[in-house]
Image (cartoon, rainbow, N blue to C red):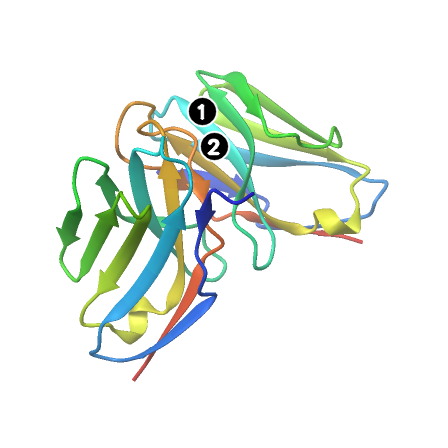
Amino acid sequence: DQQVKQNSPSLSVQEGRISILNCDYTNSMFDYFLWYKKYPAEGPTFLISISSIKDKNEDGRFTVFLNKSAKHLSLHIVPSQPGDSAVYFCAASVEYGNKLVFGAGTILRVKS
Amino acid sequence: ETGVTQTPRHLVMGMTNKKSLKCEQHLGHNAMYWYKQSAKKPLELMFVYNFKEQTENNSVPSRFSPECPNSSHLFLHLHTLQPEDSALYLCASSQRGMNYGYTFGSGTRLTVV
């Protein structure tokens, strides 16, 4: 049973528009949520995180929203750029810096 | 070198071979991990090492054998693998208790023939 789910395998967005990637989780003990970005032939790289005491965290063009009651988080990228085209993984953990559980990833394609 | 380094980047092995994957981190982290990434599946946690002690084996078959000689190095020894074990194997490190997330290596693309 997957504890972290990314139900959209892929998303296609026009350059300059908003990209919204979604993630749902089932384990209410998760306290810390992260998004990773992965290019082909590279390992995932950390993008942005949020702890359960917050509902929003922003870093430049990237904003993560957390809805604990719905066990849902989302990543907003605005404006989207062609270089944002990658696989985005949602991840969660019970403890900082330990044992992340990942979703299956969403392939984002930003068209110019 | 900085970050997390994995070697080799690509590996093709027969089902009767024995090979090892190597991971090295230069970040001073105290936890290291092996993950498996198969196509269209979540990253699957295989093993967790904290302060070079194995703290988790996520029901991984015994044909995968991890080794952590010190907090900077992690190996995954492979023997008598199956074709379905072909995947991208990712090593990561982290500092437990700190909200930095993981730092991943670039992975080893393993093909079992």
The type of residue carrying mark 1 is Ser
Of the pair A24 and B82, the residue shown nearer to us: A24
Could you say where residue A54 lies in the image, as x and y percent from the top left? 16, 40
Answer whether residue A67 is visible to the viewer in this image.
yes
Q: Secondary structure at mark 2?
A: strand
Could you say where residue B3 lies in the image, as x and y percent from the top left? 37, 38
Q: Is residue A77 left or right of residue B89?
A: left
Q: Is residue A56 left or right of residue A85?
A: left
- Tell which circle, 2 or 1, labels the residue nearer the N-terminal end: 2
Q: Are marks 2 and 1 in contact (CB under 8 Å)?
A: yes
Quadrant in which the C terminus of chain B appears? bottom right
Picture quadrant of residue A84: bottom left
Quadrant in which the N terminus of chain B appears? top left
Q: Is residue A102 left or right of residue A84?
A: right
| Residue named by callout 2 | B24
Could you say where residue A80 lies in the image, as x and y percent from the top left? 24, 72
Give the chain of mark 2.
Answer: B
Could you say where residue A49 lies in the image, as x and y percent from the top left? 25, 44
| Residue projecting furthest to the right | B16
- Mark 2 neighbour density, 10 Å: few (under 14) some (14–19) many (20 or more): many
**Which disc, if any, is residue A15?**
none
Give the chain of mark 1.
Answer: B
| Residue named by callout 1 | B72
Answer whether residue B105 is visible to the viewer in this image.
no
Q: On screen, B82 above or below A98?
A: below
CA separation in Å, label 2 and label 1: 6 Å
The type of residue carrying mark 2 is Glu
Q: Secondary structure at mark 1?
A: loop
Q: On screen, A19 above or below B84?
A: below
Tags 2 and 1 both on a single chain: yes
